């Protein structure tokens, strides 16, 4: 019998392993999660609390069977900035609150009609291609973080950044491949720690030591609720009838992030080798993400979504323990009250995060290639080749649709942008629906399963 080489969702590592495993997830999500409030003008502490609280809500609703971490969603950055500038931050947060309710409505429909229709819409050739897109479409972000700096508002290549990121990348890869036992489970944490230390020794000016020194030790509860958690913004906007129509500009963005959610659930299921669409069910994961998003907006944080960075950690470590994820969520909440800890985490150099992101995003893409192989998708079949080609190029190439320049939509959906992952998913579903020979898209394994059932 093959020995089990993973830690399952219901299992808990001993305390000495639990703490660093959870910190690894915290470090993996931190950079992206705090970047969203920085760009949108929302509060960083509120974003951290929203991230941790949203993750705990998601895990409770999904019965602890989906070990996903929820961080700030990038899909809402543009709309939040636009609506805030035009109508105020309260209206933007109300729109984010409503987008969470869109998730809840879709979850109710999935609960009623099931997910059988998804199996017909998303055969292995489509799902695998979407998974590859999710990983590789982020490649540019990882490489930019690893190699570029901003000088006078322009991005330029920095040899210093490249050096730091390559050291971090090399240490992360060696830790994942060469180390044994517990240390093999924390390669991302090891990479970040070594990358930070290397930067501190070689390029100390790149670390904002002053921000760490000036940060308060503790942020009190009263200060947190007064200056960071802006609960009253959403409730005040709700009382203004004119705010609702403006807030609805943001709500349709939920359909874009819904597609991202679906892709992430497929990736997580592939990593864990189980069908999460059916157990605990897509309706539960959508409901969890939706309520978490509404709660995040209500306390003044950005909408949250499942994070590819943390899925990469799952794939590398094969530690799926819900308690590891839950403790990472608790750390995010607790650390938001410790000013110096938050400042230290924010001081992690961008090239260090870029170095580990190269591994994390690449691992996600590799799961898609693995799915091609395991389902024996036949690429000598032109239909499969064309569908995969269309998905990969539109997704990785960054193909997007914006209604901003279409006068018909002005004032309602003018801020809606269908991102590359969503657009490539639509393309894949459409091509699979109209092209003849649907059986080939299931792969040889899918055909064999149907024959056994028949």
Image: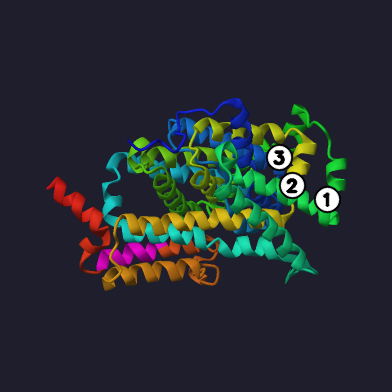
- Nearer the observer: mark 3 or 2; the answer is 2
Percent coordinates x, y for residue 408 in the rendering:
48, 69
Closer to the N terminus: mark 3 or mark 1? 3
- Say whether residue 177 is left or right of residue 90: left
In the image, taking residue 163 as reference, residue 142 lies left or right, namely left
Give the mark, 3 or 2, whose residue is nearer the N terminus. 3
Whether residue 69 is visible to the viewer of this picture, yes or no, is yes
Residue segment shown in magenta: 425-434
* Label 2 CA crowd tier, 10 Å (few <14, some 14–19, many 20+): some
Quadrant holding the N terminus: top left
Badge 1 or badge 2: first in the primary sequence: 1
Between 120 and 266, the residue placed more toward the observer is: 266
Residue 346 — which label? 2
Q: Nearest to the eye among marks 3 and 1: give it.
A: 1
Residue at the disc numbered 3: 45
Q: Are marks 1 and 2 in contact (CB under 8 Å)?
A: yes
Q: Position of residue 338 (x, y in %)?
A: 76, 33
| Contact check, label 3 and label 1, Cβ < 8 Å | no
Q: Which residue is mark 1?
A: 208
Please rate how many residues cluster around mark 1, counting C-alpha atoms within 10 Å: few if below 14, some from 14 to 19, many from 20. some
Secondary structure type for disc 3: helix
């Amino acid at each position: 019998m093959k020995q089990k080489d993973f830690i399952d969702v219901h299992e808990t590592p001993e305390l000495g392993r639990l703490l660093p495993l959870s910190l690894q997830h915290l470090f993996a999500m931190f950079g992206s999660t705090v970047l969203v409030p920085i760009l949108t003008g929302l509060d960083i502490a509120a974003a951290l609390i929203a991230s941790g609280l949203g993750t705990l809500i998601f895990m409770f609703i999904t019965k602890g069977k989906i070990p996903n971490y929820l961080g700030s969603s990038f899909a809402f950055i543009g709309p939040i900035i636009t609506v805030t500038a035009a109508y105020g931050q309260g209206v933007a947060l109300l729109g984010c609150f409503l987008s969470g309710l869109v998730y809840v409505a879709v979850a109710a429909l999935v609960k009623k009609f099931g997910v059988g229709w998804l199996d017909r819409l998303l055969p292995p050739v489509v799902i695998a291609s979407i998974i590859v897109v999710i990983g590789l479409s982020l490649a540019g972000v990882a490489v930019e973080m690893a190699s570029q700096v901003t000088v006078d508002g322009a991005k330029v290549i920095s040899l210093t950044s490249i050096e730091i990121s390559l050291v971090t990348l090399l240490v992360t890869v060696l830790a994942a491949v060469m180390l044994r036992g517990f240390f093999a489970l924390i390669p991302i944490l090891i990479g970040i720690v070594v990358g930070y230390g290397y930067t501190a020794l070689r390029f100390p000016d790149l670390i904002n030591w002053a921000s760490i020194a000036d940060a308060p030790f503790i942020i009190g509860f009263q200060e947190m609720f007064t200056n960071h958690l802006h609960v009253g913004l959403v409730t005040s906007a709700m009382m203004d009838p004119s705010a609702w129509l403006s807030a609805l500009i943001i709500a349709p963005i939920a359909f874009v992030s819904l597609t991202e959610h679906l892709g992430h659930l497929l990736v997580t299921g592939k990593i864990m080798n189980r069908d999460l669409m059916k157990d605990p069910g897509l309706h539960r994961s959508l409901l969890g993400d939706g309520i978490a998003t509404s709660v995040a907006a209500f306390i003044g944080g950005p909408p949250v979504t499942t994070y590819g960075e943390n899925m990469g950690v799952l794939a590398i470590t094969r530690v799926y323990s819900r308690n590891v994820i839950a403790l990472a969520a608790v750390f995010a909440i607790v650390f938001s009250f410790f000013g110096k800890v938050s400042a230290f985490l924010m001081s992690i150099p961008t090239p260090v995060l870029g170095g580990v992101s190269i591994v994390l995003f690449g691992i996600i893409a590799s799961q898609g290639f693995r799915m091609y192989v395991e389902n024996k998708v036949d690429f000598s079949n032109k239909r499969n080749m064309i569908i995969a080609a269309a998905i990969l190029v539109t997704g990785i190439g960054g193909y997007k649709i914006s209604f901003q320049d279409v006068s018909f939509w002005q004032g309602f959906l003018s801020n809606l942008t269908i991102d590359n992952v969503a657009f490539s998913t639509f393309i894949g579903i459409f091509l699979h629906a109209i092209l003849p020979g649907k059986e080939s898209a299931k792969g040889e394994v899918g055909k064999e399963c149907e024959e056994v059932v028949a």
